[in-house]
Amino acid sequence: MSGRNVVAPDDLAAALRALLVASSEPTPTVQEEAAAVAAVVSRNSPAAATAWADAFDSRPARFDDAVQAGKQFTAAPTPTLLRLVAKDAEAATRYARALAELAIAAASLGELTISAIATATVLGNVQLLASGTHIPSPGLFAAPAPDRPTFDAPGNPLSAAGATAPEGPAATPVPPPKTLEELLAELDELVGLDLVKTDIRHQTQVLRIQGLRVAAGLKVPDMTRHLVFVGNPGTGKTTVARLVAGIYRAIGVLAKGHLVECDRSELVAGYLGQTALKTSEVIASAIGGALFIDEAYALAHDEFGGEAIDTLVKEMEDHREELVVIVAGYPGPMHEFITSNPGLESRFRLTLTFDDYSDDQLVEIFCRLAGATDFVPTSDTVARLREILAATPRGEGFGNGRFVRTMFESAVVRQAWRLRDVTAPDVEQLRALLPADLTDATPDPTKLVAPTET
Protein backbone atom coordinates (compact mmCIF):
# COMPACT_ATOMS: atom_id res chain seq x y z
CA MET A 1 0.00 0.00 0.00
CA SER A 2 1.05 3.58 -0.39
CA GLY A 3 -0.40 7.06 -0.23
CA ARG A 4 1.47 9.99 -1.74
CA ASN A 5 2.22 13.03 0.47
CA VAL A 6 -0.86 12.57 2.66
CA VAL A 7 0.56 14.71 5.46
CA ALA A 8 1.67 18.23 4.64
CA PRO A 9 5.37 19.12 5.04
CA ASP A 10 4.18 21.86 7.39
CA ASP A 11 3.23 19.15 9.90
CA LEU A 12 6.80 17.90 10.02
CA ALA A 13 8.13 21.45 10.33
CA ALA A 14 5.71 22.10 13.20
CA ALA A 15 6.81 18.88 14.90
CA LEU A 16 10.44 19.95 14.57
CA ARG A 17 9.69 23.34 16.09
CA ALA A 18 7.91 21.66 19.01
CA LEU A 19 10.91 19.39 19.51
CA LEU A 20 13.26 22.38 19.67
CA VAL A 21 11.01 24.10 22.20
CA ALA A 22 10.88 20.95 24.37
CA SER A 23 14.65 20.84 24.87
CA SER A 24 17.28 23.25 26.12
CA GLU A 25 19.91 21.39 24.10
CA PRO A 26 21.73 23.23 21.29
CA THR A 27 19.59 23.52 18.17
CA PRO A 28 22.04 21.61 15.90
CA THR A 29 22.01 18.65 18.33
CA VAL A 30 18.22 18.44 18.38
CA GLN A 31 17.97 18.91 14.60
CA GLU A 32 20.47 16.10 14.06
CA GLU A 33 18.41 13.75 16.25
CA ALA A 34 15.22 14.80 14.47
CA ALA A 35 16.78 14.16 11.06
CA ALA A 36 17.92 10.71 12.19
CA VAL A 37 14.46 9.87 13.55
CA ALA A 38 12.76 11.02 10.34
CA ALA A 39 15.20 9.09 8.17
CA VAL A 40 14.85 5.77 9.97
CA VAL A 41 11.04 6.07 10.00
CA SER A 42 10.84 6.73 6.25
CA ARG A 43 13.79 4.60 5.14
CA ASN A 44 11.69 2.14 3.13
CA SER A 45 9.32 4.71 1.63
CA PRO A 46 9.58 5.61 -2.07
CA ALA A 47 11.05 9.08 -2.72
CA ALA A 48 11.75 9.53 0.99
CA ALA A 49 15.39 10.60 0.57
CA THR A 50 14.49 13.63 -1.53
CA ALA A 51 11.61 14.62 0.75
CA TRP A 52 13.84 14.20 3.80
CA ALA A 53 16.56 16.36 2.26
CA ASP A 54 14.03 19.11 1.54
CA ALA A 55 12.61 18.94 5.06
CA PHE A 56 15.98 19.15 6.79
CA ASP A 57 17.81 21.40 4.34
CA SER A 58 20.24 18.62 3.51
CA ARG A 59 21.22 16.45 0.55
CA PRO A 60 19.67 13.09 -0.44
CA ALA A 61 23.18 11.59 -0.36
CA ARG A 62 23.21 12.03 3.42
CA PHE A 63 19.95 10.12 3.89
CA ASP A 64 21.57 6.69 4.39
CA ASP A 65 23.94 8.03 7.05
CA ALA A 66 20.97 9.54 8.88
CA VAL A 67 19.14 6.18 8.67
CA GLN A 68 22.10 4.42 10.27
CA ALA A 69 22.24 7.04 13.02
CA GLY A 70 18.52 6.67 13.70
CA LYS A 71 18.28 2.88 13.82
CA GLN A 72 19.27 2.74 17.48
CA PHE A 73 16.33 5.00 18.41
CA THR A 74 13.84 2.24 17.53
CA ALA A 75 15.03 0.37 20.62
CA ALA A 76 16.74 2.88 22.92
CA PRO A 77 16.27 6.51 23.96
CA THR A 78 18.06 9.28 22.11
CA PRO A 79 21.11 10.85 23.81
CA THR A 80 19.22 14.10 24.38
CA LEU A 81 16.34 12.25 26.03
CA LEU A 82 18.78 10.35 28.25
CA ARG A 83 20.30 13.60 29.45
CA LEU A 84 16.87 15.04 30.16
CA VAL A 85 15.77 11.91 32.04
CA ALA A 86 18.79 12.28 34.30
CA LYS A 87 18.13 15.92 35.22
CA ASP A 88 14.52 16.94 34.48
CA ALA A 89 11.72 14.37 34.35
CA GLU A 90 9.09 16.84 33.10
CA ALA A 91 11.34 18.08 30.31
CA ALA A 92 12.10 14.45 29.39
CA THR A 93 8.38 13.73 29.09
CA ARG A 94 7.84 16.77 26.86
CA TYR A 95 10.78 15.86 24.67
CA ALA A 96 9.68 12.21 24.35
CA ARG A 97 6.18 13.30 23.32
CA ALA A 98 7.62 15.69 20.77
CA LEU A 99 9.84 12.92 19.37
CA ALA A 100 6.81 10.64 19.05
CA GLU A 101 4.88 13.37 17.23
CA LEU A 102 7.81 14.01 14.90
CA ALA A 103 8.12 10.30 14.12
CA ILE A 104 4.45 10.14 13.12
CA ALA A 105 4.82 13.26 10.94
CA ALA A 106 7.95 11.78 9.33
CA ALA A 107 6.00 8.72 8.20
CA SER A 108 4.61 10.96 5.43
CA LEU A 109 8.00 11.63 3.85
CA GLY A 110 7.87 10.39 0.27
CA GLU A 111 4.96 7.96 0.13
CA LEU A 112 3.18 6.78 3.28
CA THR A 113 3.79 3.07 3.87
CA ILE A 114 2.82 0.60 6.57
CA SER A 115 6.52 0.11 7.29
CA ALA A 116 6.88 3.83 8.06
CA ILE A 117 3.80 3.82 10.27
CA ALA A 118 4.98 0.77 12.21
CA THR A 119 8.50 2.16 12.68
CA ALA A 120 7.12 5.52 13.83
CA THR A 121 4.89 3.80 16.37
CA VAL A 122 7.67 1.60 17.72
CA LEU A 123 10.14 4.47 17.92
CA GLY A 124 7.63 6.77 19.60
CA ASN A 125 6.71 4.13 22.18
CA VAL A 126 10.37 3.48 22.98
CA GLN A 127 11.02 7.17 23.65
CA LEU A 128 7.85 7.54 25.73
CA LEU A 129 8.64 4.46 27.81
CA ALA A 130 12.19 5.66 28.40
CA SER A 131 10.85 8.97 29.74
CA GLY A 132 8.53 7.19 32.15
CA THR A 133 5.42 8.11 30.18
CA HIS A 134 2.53 5.71 30.55
CA ILE A 135 1.36 4.09 27.33
CA PRO A 136 -2.22 2.79 27.41
CA SER A 137 -2.40 -1.00 27.74
CA PRO A 138 -2.04 -3.12 25.80
CA GLY A 139 1.06 -1.37 24.46
CA LEU A 140 1.56 -1.83 20.76
CA PHE A 141 5.17 -2.91 21.00
CA ALA A 142 6.19 -3.05 24.65
CA ALA A 143 9.41 -4.90 23.91
CA PRO A 144 10.71 -3.87 20.47
CA ALA A 145 13.66 -5.59 18.91
CA PRO A 146 16.84 -3.64 19.00
CA ASP A 147 18.77 -2.56 15.96
CA ARG A 148 21.95 -0.81 17.06
CA PRO A 149 21.47 0.52 20.59
CA THR A 150 23.77 0.40 23.58
CA PHE A 151 22.35 -1.94 26.20
CA ASP A 152 22.94 -2.63 29.84
CA ALA A 153 23.37 -6.25 30.84
CA PRO A 154 20.17 -8.24 30.13
CA GLY A 155 17.41 -7.23 32.46
CA ASN A 156 17.16 -3.51 31.63
CA PRO A 157 17.04 -3.32 27.82
CA LEU A 158 15.79 0.23 27.40
CA SER A 159 18.50 1.84 29.52
CA ALA A 160 21.65 2.92 27.73
CA ALA A 161 24.88 1.68 29.26
CA GLY A 162 26.57 4.24 31.39
CA ALA A 163 23.48 6.48 31.62
CA THR A 164 22.85 8.10 34.98
CA ALA A 165 19.54 7.11 36.54
CA PRO A 166 17.29 9.91 37.81
CA GLU A 167 17.84 10.68 41.46
CA GLY A 168 15.22 11.35 44.10
CA PRO A 169 12.08 9.64 45.39
CA ALA A 170 10.70 9.01 41.90
CA ALA A 171 13.82 7.20 40.72
CA THR A 172 13.11 3.72 39.35
CA PRO A 173 15.08 0.97 41.13
CA VAL A 174 17.59 -0.72 38.87
CA PRO A 175 16.86 -4.47 38.74
CA PRO A 176 19.67 -6.76 39.87
CA PRO A 177 21.77 -8.36 37.12
CA LYS A 178 20.49 -11.70 35.94
CA THR A 179 22.16 -14.84 37.16
CA LEU A 180 24.01 -17.28 34.92
CA GLU A 181 21.13 -19.73 35.23
CA GLU A 182 18.59 -17.09 34.18
CA LEU A 183 20.67 -16.02 31.19
CA LEU A 184 21.23 -19.59 30.01
CA ALA A 185 17.49 -20.22 30.39
CA GLU A 186 16.82 -17.20 28.14
CA LEU A 187 19.29 -18.61 25.63
CA ASP A 188 17.50 -21.94 25.64
CA GLU A 189 14.14 -20.20 25.11
CA LEU A 190 15.24 -18.75 21.76
CA VAL A 191 13.68 -20.37 18.73
CA GLY A 192 16.07 -22.70 16.89
CA LEU A 193 19.85 -22.00 17.02
CA ASP A 194 20.63 -25.40 18.56
CA LEU A 195 24.30 -25.42 17.50
CA VAL A 196 24.79 -21.83 18.67
CA LYS A 197 23.29 -22.67 22.07
CA THR A 198 25.63 -25.63 22.44
CA ASP A 199 28.68 -23.57 21.47
CA ILE A 200 27.78 -20.80 23.92
CA ARG A 201 27.35 -23.29 26.75
CA HIS A 202 30.71 -24.91 25.96
CA GLN A 203 32.45 -21.52 25.83
CA THR A 204 30.80 -20.51 29.09
CA GLN A 205 31.98 -23.63 30.87
CA VAL A 206 35.54 -23.31 29.55
CA LEU A 207 35.80 -19.68 30.70
CA ARG A 208 34.17 -20.46 34.06
CA ILE A 209 36.65 -23.23 34.81
CA GLN A 210 39.50 -21.05 33.59
CA GLY A 211 38.48 -18.40 36.12
CA LEU A 212 38.38 -20.97 38.90
CA ARG A 213 41.85 -22.21 37.93
CA VAL A 214 43.21 -18.65 38.09
CA ALA A 215 41.61 -18.18 41.52
CA ALA A 216 43.28 -21.42 42.67
CA GLY A 217 46.68 -20.23 41.47
CA LEU A 218 46.85 -22.70 38.59
CA LYS A 219 48.23 -21.98 35.13
CA VAL A 220 45.74 -21.52 32.32
CA PRO A 221 46.14 -21.65 28.53
CA ASP A 222 45.49 -18.51 26.52
CA MET A 223 41.80 -18.86 25.57
CA THR A 224 40.13 -16.43 23.20
CA ARG A 225 37.00 -14.73 24.47
CA HIS A 226 36.20 -12.89 21.25
CA LEU A 227 33.64 -14.37 18.86
CA VAL A 228 32.70 -14.37 15.17
CA PHE A 229 28.99 -14.68 14.37
CA VAL A 230 28.16 -15.64 10.78
CA GLY A 231 24.70 -15.85 9.30
CA ASN A 232 22.05 -14.02 7.34
CA PRO A 233 20.11 -11.05 8.76
CA GLY A 234 17.44 -11.70 11.35
CA THR A 235 18.89 -14.97 12.67
CA GLY A 236 19.32 -13.78 16.26
CA LYS A 237 22.95 -12.63 16.23
CA THR A 238 22.33 -9.40 18.14
CA THR A 239 20.08 -11.11 20.69
CA VAL A 240 22.68 -13.79 21.36
CA ALA A 241 25.44 -11.16 21.58
CA ARG A 242 23.50 -9.39 24.32
CA LEU A 243 23.08 -12.64 26.21
CA VAL A 244 26.78 -13.46 25.80
CA ALA A 245 27.70 -10.09 27.33
CA GLY A 246 25.50 -10.85 30.32
CA ILE A 247 26.81 -14.41 30.64
CA TYR A 248 30.40 -13.20 30.58
CA ARG A 249 29.55 -10.80 33.40
CA ALA A 250 27.85 -13.56 35.38
CA ILE A 251 30.97 -15.77 35.28
CA GLY A 252 33.32 -12.90 36.10
CA VAL A 253 34.89 -12.38 32.68
CA LEU A 254 33.40 -8.87 32.31
CA ALA A 255 32.80 -6.26 34.99
CA LYS A 256 29.63 -4.67 33.55
CA GLY A 257 28.29 -6.97 30.86
CA HIS A 258 26.71 -4.26 28.71
CA LEU A 259 26.65 -4.48 24.92
CA VAL A 260 27.65 -1.65 22.58
CA GLU A 261 26.44 -2.13 19.00
CA CYS A 262 27.99 -0.44 16.00
CA ASP A 263 28.86 -0.85 12.34
CA ARG A 264 31.31 0.76 9.94
CA SER A 265 29.56 4.15 10.03
CA GLU A 266 30.14 4.47 13.78
CA LEU A 267 33.83 3.60 13.51
CA VAL A 268 35.06 5.29 10.34
CA ALA A 269 35.53 9.05 9.91
CA GLY A 270 35.93 11.06 6.72
CA TYR A 271 39.67 11.63 7.07
CA LEU A 272 42.66 9.48 7.90
CA GLY A 273 43.71 10.02 11.48
CA GLN A 274 40.18 10.81 12.64
CA THR A 275 39.06 7.21 12.27
CA ALA A 276 41.43 6.03 15.00
CA LEU A 277 39.96 8.59 17.41
CA LYS A 278 36.39 7.71 16.46
CA THR A 279 37.01 3.98 16.81
CA SER A 280 38.76 4.45 20.15
CA GLU A 281 35.80 6.42 21.49
CA VAL A 282 33.37 3.64 20.58
CA ILE A 283 35.65 1.01 22.11
CA ALA A 284 36.02 3.08 25.29
CA SER A 285 32.24 3.01 25.73
CA ALA A 286 32.36 -0.80 25.64
CA ILE A 287 35.08 -1.29 28.26
CA GLY A 288 33.79 -3.68 30.90
CA GLY A 289 31.36 -5.13 28.38
CA ALA A 290 31.14 -6.36 24.81
CA LEU A 291 31.48 -4.53 21.49
CA PHE A 292 29.28 -5.93 18.72
CA ILE A 293 30.33 -4.90 15.20
CA ASP A 294 27.68 -5.76 12.63
CA GLU A 295 28.68 -6.26 8.98
CA ALA A 296 32.28 -6.01 10.16
CA TYR A 297 33.60 -7.08 6.75
CA ALA A 298 32.74 -3.58 5.45
CA LEU A 299 35.84 -2.36 7.30
CA ALA A 300 38.15 -4.30 4.99
CA HIS A 301 37.31 -2.34 1.84
CA ASP A 302 39.54 0.74 2.08
CA GLU A 303 42.27 2.50 4.05
CA PHE A 304 39.76 4.18 6.36
CA GLY A 305 38.37 0.82 7.40
CA GLY A 306 41.91 -0.50 7.66
CA GLU A 307 42.71 2.25 10.14
CA ALA A 308 39.67 1.19 12.20
CA ILE A 309 40.85 -2.45 12.12
CA ASP A 310 44.35 -1.52 13.24
CA THR A 311 42.91 0.54 16.09
CA LEU A 312 40.58 -2.30 17.06
CA VAL A 313 43.41 -4.84 17.20
CA LYS A 314 45.52 -2.52 19.37
CA GLU A 315 42.66 -1.73 21.76
CA MET A 316 41.78 -5.43 22.07
CA GLU A 317 45.34 -6.06 23.21
CA ASP A 318 45.45 -3.03 25.53
CA HIS A 319 42.14 -4.01 27.14
CA ARG A 320 42.37 -7.78 26.83
CA GLU A 321 40.96 -8.31 30.34
CA GLU A 322 38.25 -5.65 30.06
CA LEU A 323 36.72 -6.08 26.63
CA VAL A 324 35.08 -8.73 24.49
CA VAL A 325 34.57 -8.10 20.78
CA ILE A 326 31.96 -9.89 18.68
CA VAL A 327 32.04 -9.37 14.91
CA ALA A 328 29.16 -10.44 12.69
CA GLY A 329 28.17 -10.72 9.05
CA TYR A 330 27.66 -13.03 6.08
CA PRO A 331 29.83 -16.21 6.15
CA GLY A 332 31.97 -15.60 3.03
CA PRO A 333 32.82 -11.93 3.59
CA MET A 334 33.47 -12.56 7.30
CA HIS A 335 36.05 -15.26 6.49
CA GLU A 336 37.83 -12.83 4.17
CA PHE A 337 37.65 -10.12 6.85
CA ILE A 338 39.17 -12.25 9.60
CA THR A 339 41.97 -13.58 7.40
CA SER A 340 42.79 -10.12 6.02
CA ASN A 341 44.67 -9.10 9.16
CA PRO A 342 46.98 -11.37 11.21
CA GLY A 343 45.98 -9.52 14.37
CA LEU A 344 42.32 -10.35 13.78
CA GLU A 345 42.98 -13.97 12.87
CA SER A 346 44.90 -14.60 16.09
CA ARG A 347 42.16 -13.11 18.26
CA PHE A 348 39.05 -14.58 16.66
CA ARG A 349 39.35 -18.34 16.80
CA LEU A 350 35.76 -19.29 17.55
CA THR A 351 33.07 -18.89 14.89
CA LEU A 352 29.38 -19.49 15.60
CA THR A 353 27.10 -20.18 12.64
CA PHE A 354 23.52 -18.90 12.75
CA ASP A 355 21.43 -20.97 10.36
CA ASP A 356 18.36 -19.60 8.60
CA TYR A 357 15.07 -20.33 10.33
CA SER A 358 12.74 -22.95 8.92
CA ASP A 359 9.14 -22.06 8.10
CA ASP A 360 7.99 -23.77 11.30
CA GLN A 361 10.43 -21.70 13.34
CA LEU A 362 9.37 -18.46 11.62
CA VAL A 363 5.72 -19.26 12.37
CA GLU A 364 6.67 -19.89 16.00
CA ILE A 365 8.47 -16.53 16.17
CA PHE A 366 5.40 -14.77 14.73
CA CYS A 367 3.10 -16.46 17.24
CA ARG A 368 5.43 -15.60 20.12
CA LEU A 369 5.50 -11.96 19.08
CA ALA A 370 1.73 -11.96 18.93
CA GLY A 371 1.28 -13.72 22.27
CA ALA A 372 3.73 -11.39 24.03
CA THR A 373 1.47 -8.42 23.23
CA ASP A 374 -1.93 -10.10 23.67
CA PHE A 375 -2.67 -10.78 20.03
CA VAL A 376 -3.98 -14.12 18.77
CA PRO A 377 -3.54 -15.18 15.12
CA THR A 378 -6.32 -17.49 14.01
CA SER A 379 -5.56 -20.87 12.46
CA ASP A 380 -6.44 -19.42 9.05
CA THR A 381 -3.99 -16.57 9.69
CA VAL A 382 -1.23 -19.04 10.47
CA ALA A 383 -2.07 -20.98 7.31
CA ARG A 384 -1.91 -17.75 5.28
CA LEU A 385 1.43 -16.91 6.90
CA ARG A 386 2.79 -20.29 5.82
CA GLU A 387 1.67 -19.60 2.25
CA ILE A 388 3.48 -16.26 2.27
CA LEU A 389 6.64 -17.83 3.67
CA ALA A 390 6.55 -20.63 1.10
CA ALA A 391 6.28 -18.08 -1.72
CA THR A 392 9.06 -15.81 -0.42
CA PRO A 393 12.50 -16.30 -2.03
CA ARG A 394 15.30 -17.11 0.41
CA GLY A 395 18.76 -15.68 0.01
CA GLU A 396 21.20 -13.35 1.71
CA GLY A 397 18.66 -10.54 1.61
CA PHE A 398 15.91 -12.52 3.36
CA GLY A 399 15.26 -11.10 6.83
CA ASN A 400 14.39 -14.32 8.71
CA GLY A 401 13.15 -13.19 12.12
CA ARG A 402 13.06 -9.57 10.99
CA PHE A 403 10.83 -10.59 8.10
CA VAL A 404 8.14 -12.05 10.37
CA ARG A 405 8.54 -9.24 12.91
CA THR A 406 7.79 -6.74 10.15
CA MET A 407 4.83 -8.85 9.10
CA PHE A 408 3.54 -8.87 12.68
CA GLU A 409 3.97 -5.12 13.14
CA SER A 410 2.22 -4.47 9.82
CA ALA A 411 -0.57 -6.88 10.79
CA VAL A 412 -1.17 -4.92 14.00
CA VAL A 413 -1.48 -1.68 12.02
CA ARG A 414 -3.84 -3.32 9.52
CA GLN A 415 -5.94 -4.82 12.33
CA ALA A 416 -6.39 -1.36 13.82
CA TRP A 417 -7.50 -0.07 10.42
CA ARG A 418 -9.85 -3.04 9.96
CA LEU A 419 -11.61 -2.13 13.22
CA ARG A 420 -11.92 1.56 12.34
CA ASP A 421 -15.73 1.45 12.11
CA VAL A 422 -16.24 -0.75 15.18
CA THR A 423 -17.18 1.68 17.93
CA ALA A 424 -16.69 -0.71 20.85
CA PRO A 425 -14.76 -3.81 19.78
CA ASP A 426 -14.81 -6.65 22.29
CA VAL A 427 -11.69 -8.30 23.69
CA GLU A 428 -11.77 -11.08 21.11
CA GLN A 429 -11.88 -8.58 18.26
CA LEU A 430 -9.05 -6.56 19.81
CA ARG A 431 -6.86 -9.64 20.09
CA ALA A 432 -7.60 -11.47 16.85
CA LEU A 433 -5.27 -11.23 13.85
CA LEU A 434 -7.06 -12.39 10.71
CA PRO A 435 -5.66 -13.48 7.32
CA ALA A 436 -6.66 -10.09 5.89
CA ASP A 437 -4.26 -8.46 8.35
CA LEU A 438 -1.37 -10.09 6.50
CA THR A 439 -2.34 -8.47 3.20
CA ASP A 440 -1.99 -4.89 2.07
CA ALA A 441 -4.51 -2.30 3.16
CA THR A 442 -4.47 1.48 3.24
CA PRO A 443 -4.83 3.10 6.69
CA ASP A 444 -6.31 6.54 7.15
CA PRO A 445 -3.37 8.85 8.00
CA THR A 446 -5.68 11.33 9.75
CA LYS A 447 -6.33 8.69 12.42
CA LEU A 448 -2.63 8.02 13.07
CA VAL A 449 -1.58 9.85 16.22
CA ALA A 450 1.31 9.46 18.61
CA PRO A 451 0.55 7.52 21.82
CA THR A 452 -0.66 9.81 24.60
CA GLU A 453 -0.88 9.43 28.34
CA THR A 454 -4.27 8.60 29.81
Image (cartoon, rainbow, N blue to C red):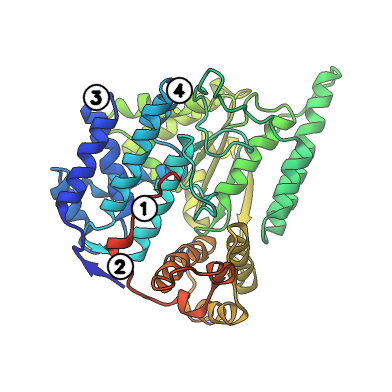
- Residue 80 screen position, x and y as percent: 36, 29
Q: Is residue 356 visible?
A: no
Residue in the image at 21% along x and 48% along y: 12
Residue picked out by circle 2? 444
Number of numbered markers: 4
Horizontal side, residue 84 vs residue 359: left or right: left
Residue in the image at 15% along x and 43% along y: 58
- Element under disc 4: helix
State yes or no: discs 3 and 4 in contact (Cβ < 8 Å).
Answer: no
Q: Earlier in the sequence, mark 3 or mark 4?
A: 3
In the rendered structure, find residue 365 and report the number of the disc placed on it.
none
Q: Say above or below: 351 vs 432.
A: above
Q: Is residue 272 visible?
A: yes
Residue picked out by circle 3? 26
Looking at the rendering, which quadrant does residue 177 occupy?
top right
State yes or no: discs 4 and 2 in contact (Cβ < 8 Å).
Answer: no
Residue picked out by circle 1? 120
